[in-house]
Amino acid sequence: MQSGTDVDIQVGDNLNHSYIARKLAVNRRILCASPEYLARAGAVNSLDELIDHSCLIINEKNNSFGNWALTDGEQQVLCRLNSHYSSNSGKVILNWALKSHGIALRSAWDVTPYLSTGELVHVLPQWYQQANIWAVYTQRTSESPRMKVFIDFLAEYFADKSLSQEWQA
C-alpha cells in the first residue's frame, strides 16, 4: 500500500500481513481464448502445451513475468509461457483475447458473458488461479467510522455481484 492510501483493493491472496485484510469476494482466474484463435493455433490439451501458444500476459506487481501459477485444487503448477503480448491492463488483455491474439488468464466474472455468447472458450477448465478480492487497510483506517462504512459497502457490493457458483471454490 502506498503512503496516504486508506483502502487498497487487491486481487489475489499474496497479501502483506502487516495490514488488515477483509475478503470481499471469492474469485478465480480462468484460461480462455476465442474459437478463432484455437482453430488457427490448435486446441490446448495440457498445461505443457501452453508454451506453444501465444499467452496474453498481464503485468502485475507480485507476479513473475512469463509464468502463470495454476492449480486444479490439489496441485500447484508454475507454467512457463511464450508471448509477444503483455499489458498492465486487464481490459486490454480481454480485448486481445476477443480479437484472437491468444490465451488469456482472466477473472471468471469478467469473461463469463463472453463464454455465454461463445465469443470465448474456456481452455483447460480444470485449471485456474485463485484470485480472491480483498480490501486491505491499516489499523488506523480500521478505527475510522467512515472507512468501516465504506468497507462494509464494498463487501455488500461484491456479495451482490452475480459471481457464478461454478467458478467459486
Image (spheres, rainbow, N blue to C red):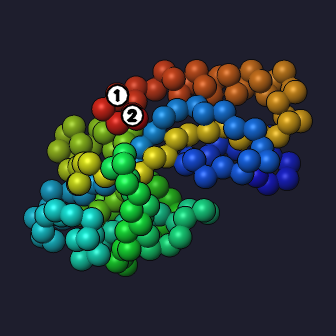
Give residue 10's mark: none
Looking at numbered disc 2 in the image, what kind of residue is underneath it? Gln
Q: Is residue 136 above or below residue 102?
A: above
Quadrant of image for the C terminus = top left
Question: What SS does tag 1 mark?
Answer: helix
Write the residue at 49% across / 46% down. 131
Q: Is residue 146 above or below residue 47?
A: above
Write the residue at 42% across / 51% down. 129
Could you say which is closer to the camera, residue 95 or residue 37?
37
- Separation of marks 2 and 1 at Cα, in angstroms: 5 Å
In the displayed structure image, the side of residue 131 where residue 93 appears, left or right: left
Label 1, residues with CA under 10 Å away: few <14, some 14-19, many ≥20: few
In the displayed structure image, the side of residue 123 where residue 77 appears, left or right: right
Specify whether residue 58 is in view. Answer: yes
Write the residue at 16% across / 62% down. 45
Could you say which is closer to the camera, residue 139 or residue 119?
139
Q: Which residue is mark 1?
A: 165
In the displayed structure image, the side of residue 75 where residue 24 appears, left or right: right
Looking at numbered disc 1 in the image, what kind of residue is underneath it? Gln
Q: Which residue is mark 2?
A: 168
State yes or no: discs 2 and 1 in contact (Cβ < 8 Å).
Answer: yes
